[in-house]
Amino acid sequence: MDLSFFTDPHSHFGTNPRKEIEKRDIQFLKEVAKPNVNNFPLFKTPSNAKPSALPKLTDKGGHRYVSEVSDKIKFSHGTTTLAFLFKGGVLVAVDSRASMGSYIGSGTVKKVIPVSKYLIGTMAGGAADCSFWERNLAMQCRLHELREGKRISVAAASKLLGNVVFQYRGYGLSMGTMMAGWDEKKGPGLFYVDSDGTRLKGNLFSVGSGATYAYGVLDSGYSYDLDEKQAIELGKRAIYHATHRDAYSGGTINVFVIRETGWEQMYKGDMNELHYGQYMDEAAAEAKAS
């Protein structure tokens, strides 16, 4: 018995609307794709049939922005983040600018990602990479807390993140993050983790394109014996000077302090207000005194 009627009933009546619709759609797409015809934004196509054959972008020094392995354009990402230990806990300070080459994508990026009440991570490099993997880490830390009945240590959390990104080494991840927190037994802790799987423990780190400038301020003013007010001022000043000199950093300064009771945001201020307000007044007072 011929049961093809159930799969294509129109063939028994001499018409096939499905094929007619497909034929019209294909013809429509061919017309739309023609240059200078039906200038719909959604259907604009490159003038070159092979985009990979477009000229390679280079800077004045002849350095290519296009990878030799793939033809994807490489954009520079910039930021300034820092963290250090002091006698009151851990201080974390970041800017808020997101850049893609010379283009400023946003001035209000949250570069501190909460992992738990006692643990936070910073964002430098690819925003999507840092955001995804640190939120993934937050999930793993919560699962650890549910399984073990106690919160994870800063060292263990940083090791988890380092192990994960190490597995993806060579796949294009771009991450330079600091994990800062407070342990129940060991107190404050600070680790640096990057997309190569590098994991370092330390008392002071600065990551990003403005790190060189931030280190200059930190090296001249850092001491473990700083009180909380002095630590906040040092973090603000280091981020300010870095953003003042580094074109890829800017926006607002966000300062966090991690204590035994958990993390807390202690300051949020605009760079320009600091420049034309507090620091300009201080510079004028020093000049007048001299």
Image: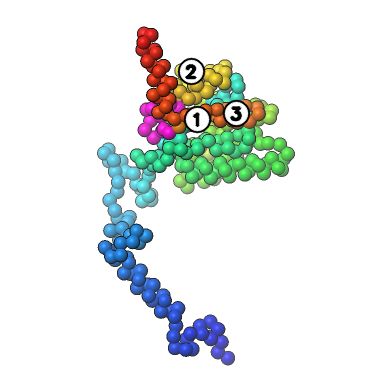
Front residue (pair 231, 212): 231
The magenta span reads: 239-251
Residue 53 visible? The answer is yes
Could you tell me which secondary element the residue under label 3 belongs to? strand
Q: Is residue 163 visible?
A: no
Contact between labelled residues 2 and 1, with CB atoms less than 8 Å apart: no
Q: In which quadrant will I find the C terminus?
A: top left
- Give the alpha-carbon distance from disc 1 to disc 3, as whole Å: 16 Å
Q: Are marks 3 and 2 in contact (CB under 8 Å)?
A: no
Could you say where residue 125 lies in the image, as x and y percent from the top left? 46, 39
Q: Residues within 10 Å of mark 1 (few under 14, many from 20)?
A: some
Can you identify the residue that label 2 sits on?
221
Can you tell which mark lies on residue 258?
3
Q: Amino acid at mark 1?
A: Lys
Q: Of the two numbered discs 1 and 2 on the same chain, state the one appearing first in sequence.
A: 2
User: What mark, if any, has residue 194 been given in the picture?
Assistant: none
Report which residue position mark 1 lands on: 268
Q: Which residue does the image show at 41% across and 22% down from the upper left?
A: 277
Q: How many badges with numbers are in the image?
A: 3
